[in-house]
Amino acid sequence: MIGQPVRRVVLLVIAVSLLANGVAFAQKAEAFKEAREKMVSEYIVREGVTNPRVLASMRQVPRHEFVDRAQRPLAYNDSSLPIGYKQTISPPFVVAYMTETLDPKPDDRVLEIGTGSGFQAAVLSNLVKEVYSIEIVEPLGKQAAERLKRLKYDNVTTKVGDGYLGWEEHAPFDKIIVTCSPESVPQPLVDQLKDGGKLLVPLGERYQQVFHLYEKKDGKLVSTKLISTLFVPMTGKSEDQRQVKPDPLHPNVLNGGFEEDADNDGYADHWHHLRLVTLLSEGAAEGKRCVLFESSARERLAQGLQATAIDGTKIGSLQLKVQYKIEGTKAGAESHEQPALVVHFYDENRRLFESITVGPWIGTTDDWRSVSKTITVPPKSREMIIRIGLNGGTGKLWLDDVQLTPKLR
């Protein structure tokens, strides 16, 4: 039997430990709350999302709970992150943008195709009456269901299955949101949408997609074309039956001269996640157009992205060419925050494992300069993203004539 003095010491140690853990938990919770506030102000409000209900939900949902522990330090950055099984969690801006575009109402019943981590469903949960969410990858679907239940998003119902078939027994739906990229709108989703309802979906080729917002009127869909984006395609039969498939032996840059703007929205086609960029119709190095990235705030993401497939077992190197002009450019606080062209390589699980920089371009030039660089392709590369811009640096950066030429091993 433990004597009274010893017992008091043991109880005191336990109490101190519990208090310390409680303080640590409170500090961590406060840190995550501050990170969410910064995420919303830096990456969402600044980029044009204004719906107060959407912003409130983005501030509330603990995004770090929806990523692996190893990814938690990056949870509140404006980037996609791997969640396993070749899937990713969408960047915060994309989630907020899609949610606002869907215009959620408190009495809405919403169908989500592509549960993934469950983050989009959690954001919607605060805004609508009911969310029904389908995930085709069984382990992800089960993990998301357990996570949403643990975090008490009780108005979210999930199942594992082919989302392109919809969820007929719960139809019709006021809104449908597709968080993976089909080649065209699956007919069951059209059938299960209420008349007057809205459907938001990223459509296009595997690495070239555009958001489309549809409204159902008299049984037919009326489409509005929105911004370019990049989503992980859904696996399964529909994906296998795509008419246009990526060619990993011929990676290339589309609209590298920034001449194309088919919808006249002021953004160069085929580039996504554009930030602090202006499409100029004069002063180009080649052709009629070029782009200008401009920022006076360090850490702001003045950038543009483009993705493509690549087979590193067959492609040995890439020759990159670009023309640039700079005025007063400076690096940001972090080593990666520099005006440059950066190539990010991803493995078969869509995990970023290497980045190679063309640049950085610091200072001021009197006129356009051309740069060419040959980079080695790691053998395990299966996808790549080209990032152009100030990337967290400051000043003005003009770019034109981005070219990529692959060379076989």
Image (tube, grey):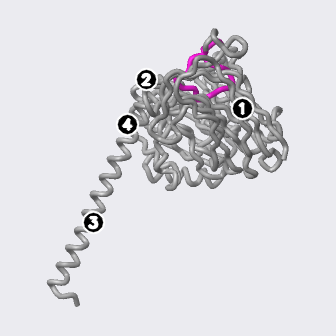
Residue sitting nearer the eye, 334 or 97:
334
Q: Which amino acid, mark 1?
A: Ser
Rounded to the nearest whole Å, what is the CA distance between mark 2 and mark 4? 15 Å
The answer to which quarter of the image holds residue 317 is top right
Percent across and percent down for residue 349 are 67, 51
Which of labels 2 and 4 is toward the front? 4
Asked whether residue 193 is drawn in magenta, I would say no
Asked whether residue 270 is drawn in magenta, I would say yes
Q: Which quadrant would the N terminus be assigned to in this image?
A: bottom left
Residue sitting nearer the eye, 324 or 9:
324
* SS at circle 1: strand
Dot 1 corresponds to which residue? 372
* SS at circle 3: helix
Q: Which amino acid, mark 4?
A: Glu
Rounded to the nearest whole Å, what is the CA distance between mark 1 and mark 3? 59 Å
**Mark closer to the chain start, 1 or 3:** 3
Span highlighted in magenta in the image: 264-279
Which of labels 2 and 1 is toward the front? 1
Q: Which amino acid, mark 2?
A: Thr
Percent across and percent down for residue 329 are 50, 26
Residue 37 badge: 4
Rounded to the nearest whole Å, what is the CA distance between mark 3 and mark 2? 41 Å
Rounded to the nearest whole Å, what is the CA distance between mark 4 and mark 3? 28 Å
Tell me the residue at 46%/48% (across/down): 64
Residue 50 badge: 2
Instruction: Tell me the crowding category of disc 4: few under 14, some 14 to 19, or many 20 or more residues within 10 angstroms, Cα based.
Output: some
**Mark closer to the chain start, 2 or 1:** 2
Above or below 114: residue 43? above
Residue extending farthest to the top is 282
Residue 18 badge: 3
Residue 217 badge: none
